[in-house]
Image (spheres, rainbow, N blue to C red):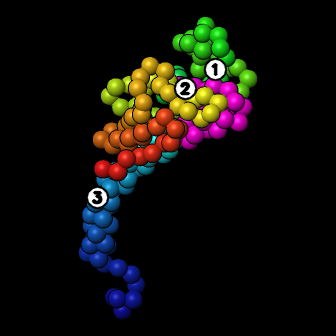
Amino acid sequence: MRGDRGFTFLELLVVTLVIGISLAIAIPAMNNALDRNKVFTSSELVAAQIREARLAAITRNSTFRVRFDCFGGTAVRMVIVTGNPTVDNASDRCTQQVPNDGPPIYLPPNVSFGAGGPPPALEINGRGQVSAVAGTMPQTLSVSYGDFTRTLVVTEAGRVRTPTS
C-alpha cells in the first residue's frame, strides 16, 4: 500500500538534484549564446543599414551617408547629403530630419563598435560607390558585446561581408 500513494522524500530529493545540476550547466551556455546572438544581430542591423543607404543612393541618384556616431554611438542612421556642409557635417545631424533620411537604428544595450569607438561615416554616391568620410577603404567595422566581436568589411563597390576566421 505504501507504493500506491506518491513519491518518497529521497526520490523527490534525487529528482530536484538532477534538475539543479542540469540548470547549473545549461544557464551559462544559454547566456553565452544570447551574448553571441546580440553581436550577430547588431552586425546584421549595421550591414542592412549600409545596404539600404546604397539602394537609396542608386535609386534617387543622390549621395547618402551612413553615420555610426548617432546618439553617442548607440545608433546607426542613413542620412542624405544635402550639399550644405553646415548641415551635412553637423555634430547633431543624427537628430535633424531632412527629407529622405532614414530612421535611427538603435543597437541593443551595451553593444558597441569595438574599442576604437564608432567608425567614420561612409558616403555612398548615386552609382553605389562607397567611400569613408575620414578613413580608407575597404572599411573594417567591429561590433562588440562582452567577449564577442564580429567584423564587417565594406568595400568600395558597396559589398558588405563578414570575413571568416
The residue positioned 31% from the left and 53% from the top of the image is: 28
Give the SS element for disc 1. loop
Name which quarter of the figure residue 135 lies in.
top left
Give the SS element for disc 2. strand
Residue 147 image offset from top left, x and y in percent: 30, 41
Mark 1 crowdedness (10 Å alpha carbons): few <14, some 14-19, many ≥20: many
**Cα distance, mark 3 to mark 2?**
48 Å
| Span highlighted in magenta in the image | 47-68
The residue positioned 28% from the left and 60% from the top of the image is: 25
Is 21 located above or below residue 120 in the figure?
Answer: below
**Cα distance, mark 1 to mark 3?**
53 Å
- Verify whether residue 34 appears in magenta: no
Relative depth, front residue between 63 and 15: 63
Residue 101 image offset from top left, x and y in percent: 67, 26
Residue 121 image offset from top left, x and y in percent: 50, 24
Give the SS element for disc 3. helix
Mark 2 crowdedness (10 Å alpha carbons): few <14, some 14-19, many ≥20: many
Mark 3 crowdedness (10 Å alpha carbons): few <14, some 14-19, many ≥20: few
The residue positioned 53% from the left and 38% from the top of the image is: 158
Q: Amino acid at mark 2?
A: Glu
Q: Could you tell me if residue 76 is visible in this image?
A: no
Asked if the residue at tag 2 contacts the one at tag 1, i.e. Cβ–Cβ closer than 8 Å, the answer is yes
Is 66 located above or below residue 2 in the figure?
Answer: above
Which residue lies under the disc numbered 2? 123
Q: Which mark is residue 81?
A: 1
Relative depth, front residue between 79 and 17: 79
Relative depth, front residue between 3 and 156: 156
Q: Could you tell me if residue 157 is visible in this image?
A: yes
Which residue lies under the disc numbered 3? 24
- Verify whether residue 48 appears in magenta: yes
